[in-house]
Amino acid sequence: MPQNAPSAANRAGFPHEWTSVYANARHNAAFPVSHDAPAWLRQGVGWNYAEARAWPLSDKLPFGDKVYGEREALPVQTQFMGNALGVTAVDGVIYAESDDMFAYALNARTGQLIWRASPLQNNLMGDPVVAGNSVYLSAGSVSFNFAHVIKYAKTGKTSRGEDESFNGVVSLNKNTGKFQWLFLTQGEAMPTPAYAYGALFVSTGAGNVFAIDASNGRKIWETHVGGIANMSDPVVYKGRVYLSMSVVPYVYCLDAKTGKVLWKQTIKGAVNTGMGDVAPVVDNGIVVQDTVADKRVHDGHKTVDTIIEAMSAKTGKILWKANMGRGPLPPRLQGRHADDP
Amino acid sequence: MPQNAPSAANRAGFPHEWTSVYANARHNAAFPVSHDAPAWLRQGVGWNYAEARAWPLSDKLPFGDKVYGEREALPVQTQFMGNALGVTAVDGVIYAESDDMFAYALNARTGQLIWRASPLQNNLMGDPVVAGNSVYLSAGSVSFNFAHVIKYAKTGKTSRGEDESFNGVVSLNKNTGKFQWLFLTQGEAMPTPAYAYGALFVSTGAGNVFAIDASNGRKIWETHVGGIANMSDPVVYKGRVYLSMSVVPYVYCLDAKTGKVLWKQTIKGAVNTGMGDVAPVVDNGIVVQDTVADKRVHDGHKTVDTIIEAMSAKTGKILWKANMGRGPLPPRLQGRHADDP
């Protein structure tokens, strides 16, 4: 067994797999803790683990108020700062992906390192997917390169992450972190893949959706839907794959077996990246998607509506829609701690 | 003293500072080893140190033959693979910058870690500059973001690295690696700064050249010359700063005191990035610059001339020019070890 792996007693009470971002198509990562779970899990436990590029909280951050450049682009800078999403809890182990390009497996009780791996020179911004003996990671950055800048100027089209570094989905042994296979993609593969039917489903910055054989990394099908995948992670529900894309914003429903697009739907007024950054939730035959929409200047401040919309999982027909209110553009980390006023 | 620092005896025989990429304006990093240098330095010594993202040589690389995307953009991928340049040797310590975003100080005799630091979430691609009690690093990546892609489409202009992450020059204590100051720049600061007259001179992906007070990180002057700085590091010679830029390719000579451009010169037929990737060499009143030039397809293969040109350091006047021959485009790492056929 690798160092610091949990004992059998400390593996009890946990999920045995983690097949999607936030664990399931409902995106509710909470799991019930049974009465035979160890006391530390029932009562809770606290520890810290410093990632490779951790900046000591006691140190003065060198970044002041001022961040250069266009306001629109500031969020990019926040994406190199740690764990973009939550962690994965399986059989007494916490798996985490970090923007520092490492994936970590930690003992859930002690916080001690079991393994760490950096199989690709790229950001890992998802939630590790665990199924069988494998952990699956997706890699991609938010960047463009000069060739694509020129291409966009000429054609109005570009793909994010292409030729920036190696993008794709990687499989590691969940106990040792050892490399098993890599599925390279043209654009960045930033969303967390969804695991179902022995396959992984992922969308990319080149506007493609892939089904990949989870056992060997071979492609099952590929569908070009267009747009750019941001952080909207595909979910699988009753034989179908649901996902959202940015630029232009759409929710897509694909047949999980064939990759055929069964329907697509949008939310009126959604800003370009509003849907591509939020994973749809599916349950009870309903797809729920939210977005920021209808950007407008109000009293000198940029404001947006916050829209939530439910669609029929079968047809994409809009079932209901709610506006949770107009408010300022979401706050951004501008070179400081997010909680620093 | 920090851990693993060299003893006084093991500091002997080394340079006491390192003020430029490859040590000096001649770019000859070899230094004479005196007879009182320790035996291990006179005879040579061998060790390995694994950087944060080192991939064990015994492991199978997951990357196959195929790399996606446009040929022109492939070099980008090679830039996340370790040490872009050589190392710095000062007083028994080896200083190194890595694309893994860490800077390292290692005991030159033993290879043991004295300190490592990752003060910016960005690639460090230069040669650490050491002067006085400080080590100076420059940070910048080769990437563009979506806002700049759109800007380029509209205006034909862009700056590299802007809003991708924090770019700039950072000062650390050379003995401890502790942060001292940060000078933020708009575009990437990938070239190694040159140290002279108590100042650091650096060029950026936004087409700017800066003189920075090395003691406190304050700006002395700023000159916008245009273009994009790649890996062409400024050199200082007799009160002047020499540097090359890409897109459009030019050698510039600036007054070190005022930042005034005294002359600029180009090499006929130089490809856009040909000069911006090679630091000029200055000695004996002559600036020597090379470039690949005149890209042409020959028998179905892309070929280039390899031009070397000497200019008067005083006036920029071309003194002589040689074509070292036409050959294939330089080989690129395409998802494999560079030496893998």
Image (cartoon, coloured by chain):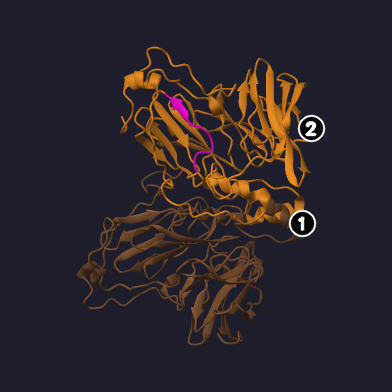
Chain colours: A brown, B orange
Read off the magenta span. Answer: B82-90
Q: Label 1's element?
A: helix
Q: Viewer-proximal residue, B328 or B260?
A: B328
Q: CA distance from mark 2 to mark 1?
A: 26 Å
Q: Quadrant of residue A254?
A: bottom right
The amino acid type found where label 2 is placed reads: Lys
Q: Is residue A94 above or below residue A55?
A: below
Q: How many marks?
A: 2
Circles 2 and 1 on the same chain:
no
Q: Chain of mark 2?
A: B
From the image, tell me which residue sits under label 1: A154
Q: Position of residue B277 (x, y in %)?
A: 64, 36
Q: In this rendering, would B307 be left or right of B62?
A: right
Specify whether residue B83 is painted magenta.
yes
The answer to which quarter of the image holds residue A220 is bottom right
Task: Pinpoint residue B161: horizontal percent, then vertical percent.
Answer: 60, 46
- Left or right of residue B22: residue B240: right
Q: Residue at x 69, y 27 (%)?
A: B289
Q: Nearer the viewer, mark 2 or mark 1?
A: 2
As for residue A243 lying within the magenta part, the answer is no
The chain identifier of the residue carrying mark 1 reads A
